[in-house]
Image: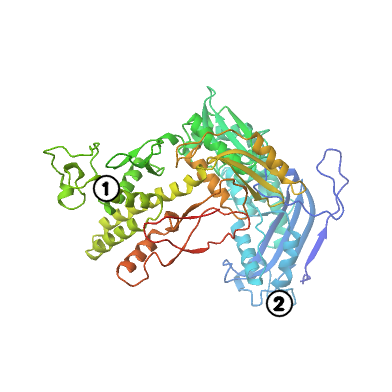
Amino acid sequence: MSDPRATVRAVPQPLPRPGAGRPATAGAAPLQVGFDELGTPLREVTFVVVDLETTGGSAEACAITEIGAVKVRGGEVLGELATLVDPEGPVPAHIQVLTGITTSMLVGAPRLPEVLPSFLEFARGAVLVAHNAPFDIGFLKAAARRTGHAWPGFPVVDTVRLARRVVTRDEVPNHRLASLAALFRSSTTPEHRALADARATVDVLHGLLDRLAPLGVTHLEDLAGAGDPVPADVRRKRTLADGLPHAPGVYLFRGPKDEVLYVGTSTTSLRTRVRTYFTAGEKRGRMTEMVRLATRVDTVVCATPLEARVRELRLIAEHSPRYNRRSRFPERMPWVRLTAEPYPRLSVVREVREEPGAVHLGPFASRGAAALAVEALHGAFPVRQCTRRLPVVAPAGASACVLAEVGRCGAPCTGGQDVAAYAEVVAAVRSAMTGDPWPVVSAHATRIGHLVAQERFEEATTVRDRLQAFLRGATRAQRVGPLAALPELVAAAPLPEGGWELAVVRHGRLAATARVDRRSDPMPVVDALCASAEHVDRPPWPASAAHPEETDLVLAWLEGPGVRVVRAPEGWACPVGGAQSVSDVAAAVTTAALVAGGRRAPLGTEERVAPGPRTAGTPTTPVPVVAPPAGAAGRRSA
């Protein structure tokens, strides 16, 4: 009977030859590798080939009876682990016949809580390899859950998937371990015992890697997608990524006429990101088409991830690459304008113009979304909907439209409403656009309630969509406007490794950015950044001086955890109780309905959460504030 105790054997290594892999260092920890790290040659990767014997096929209902593992690197065996495991129950008869492991053999064997830590330590920092990996890795993960151990998240290679890629049925009848071991002339014959099967899998792995090398699979990142078919012409293009930097930045795929085909970004490693386009991980058909056309890849290295994202937007807007679907035409993003005239009206416009008395909402993703926001305001306020400019005094003989007849308009076109009376309506519209959105929410909540009561659910959905479009446009304007008005704001975000990521923002546009390590004083760098930052002209309010999505990126960064405002000479404030306080449309509609029914306190006296910009020392959690009375727009100082 074999010894049930775990055995770990260290295999002596020959002295390293010059240039033959990395030298061994006594006591050195295994190299931590992962599929996200590119440029690691396979000869430098530590693999742990593992095989299990179990009492059945279900990882949840069955137990492990034997673990065998072989650690290899560069073709050399570094060590082996083999142990029987007490399953704390009988071994089924058919399993005993298959593996030769009987219940009596497992008496006195270590139990799983004793064995698993030894295996996890043996495999630490390695890539796990198994034949039919979902089976073995599934059992190991289940064992980790049952014993209270955190699964380390090993990268996994399945030799079955690799074999299906490079071994045809003309060579072997199937892709079972025994068939592949015979094909690659393994020195060990699989026999349904863990260590023997793991040794055979090592020989199969080496044979498969030999076949994959001519296909360009020479690094760990190539192996990650080697099990899936990749067109040969696409795989050959992987050399376009050679020599690209391991740094955050922007990449540009260029075509045969030097045109920009596609612009993308990486916040960690340009080379890592670009090489994914030549693997099976890229499933988008249009990207495969783009790669086939590409002749080279240009890169722009950026100091920070924020700069990389911003530069991507700017380059997409500049070149309008045909394979980029978003952010290509920022000038097409419409706004809703409350015009400045004796009898103002709402209109959808392409740009914001500096016009005293005019108010803007947006920008919106599409003209349809802007039109829905206009309909929402028309549904809440009796503002005129005709498009012509009206004189102060109505001409004789003018006739009113049907909206006046049903009470949806005061008919200023016929003299039914003078400038002063109409100005009261306009003041309420302006307040809803720039501050308190609850009159619009209330009106739509009432309408939705009536429609739902009549089971007209499709119409209720349309009303909800109008309200949602208005709130999105108002939120964007109320977030972007205060930042766009600032001539300069300097902020700092803490880096995970210590130090700071600095950004200078002018009128909503990223003007400069830099990183400061933890050993340096950041203030001299702040002074230098401000002195050298891009000059930005003041835009018409509330538009920013940048691509709308760039300002959204900057705002998201400013609202990130731990970000501190270093300088904001003119302050930074957003409306308290504005559209940002209505993050959940359904909840807002319910609240408005309860208020209308008298089952909740009036909106002006209840607490609302006021999101918005934070300064140094401000908690990251929302702070309840008392909302102003309906129609009033408070301001929260930054």
Seen in the picture, residue 407 relative to 285 is either above or below; the reply is below
561 with respect to 323 (left or right): right
Callout 1 secondary element: helix
Q: Quadrant of the N terminus?
A: bottom right
Q: Secondary structure at mark 2?
A: helix
Three-letter code, disc 1? Ala
List x then y, in percent, for residue 207. 69, 44
Determine the residue positioned at 33% across, 68% down.
594
- Say which amino acid is labelled 2: Ser
Closer to the chain start, of discs 2 and 1, is 2
Q: Where residue 60 appears, x then y in whole percent?
A: 57, 69
Instruction: In the rendered view, tell whether residue 635 sits above or below residue 263.
Output: below
Q: Residue furthest top?
A: 257
Pick whichever, 492 or 240, lies toward us.
Answer: 492
**Residue at point 73%, 47% (across, down):** 45
Separation (CA) of disc 2 from disc 1: 99 Å
Residue bearing the label numbered 2? 104
Observer-nearest of 332 and 288: 332
The residue to which callout 1 is attached is 420
